[in-house]
Image (cartoon, helix red, strand yellow):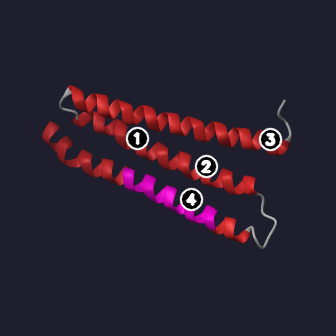
Amino acid sequence: MYAMIEIILPEIIHFLEFIGIVIILIGATQAFLFYLGSFFKKEGERNIKLMLGSSLELGLEYKMGAEILKTVLIRDMNEIWILGSIIVLRALLSFLIHYEMKHQTVVHTGSGE
């Protein structure tokens, strides 16, 4: 059973990481196109930031899910420290992006104190 997991799990991990990369790439491209369009229209910068932040947050969630699945394949303590550091950094990035998006929404709507 464990041999089967060692064969299938890396493929699932790579697939989740690929999905995260695609989401970030599509979101960044879309935000850039909206940014270019904002020179011709009065599209708010805030909407572009929220769009990019949302895709970054979702992409990081997929990549963090892949990192969590990697814990099944860990063989020594050094890998645990590296993987734990990566998970903490990605969680921190996700939290900061979420905080920035929430702050942008509050500032734009004027409901902040």
Crowd around label 2: few <14 · some 14–19 · many ≥20 (10 Å): many
Tell me which numbered mark, 4 or 3, is placed earlier along the sequence: 4
Tell which tag, 1 or 3, sits nearer the viewer.
3
Tell which tag, 4 or 3, sits nearer the viewer.
3
Image position of 11 (left or right of 85): left
Crowd around label 4: few <14 · some 14–19 · many ≥20 (10 Å): many
From mark 3 to mark 2, how far is it between C-alphas?
A: 16 Å
Magenta highlight on residue 2? no
Tell me which numbered mark, 2 or 4, is placed earlier along the sequence: 4
The percent coordinates of residue 79 (x first, y second) are: 24, 32
Task: Report the residue marked by disc 2.
Answer: 53
Looking at the rendering, the stretch of residues picked out in magenta corresponds to 17-32
Identify the mark at residue 107; answer none if there is no mark. 3
The percent coordinates of residue 67 (x first, y second) are: 35, 39
Image quadrant holding the N terminus, namely top left
Whether tag 2 and tag 4 are in contact, CB under 8 A, the answer is no
Identify the mark at residue 65; answer none if there is no mark. 1
- Give the SS element for disc 3: helix
**Which one is in front, 9 or 47?**
47
Amino acid at dot 3: Val
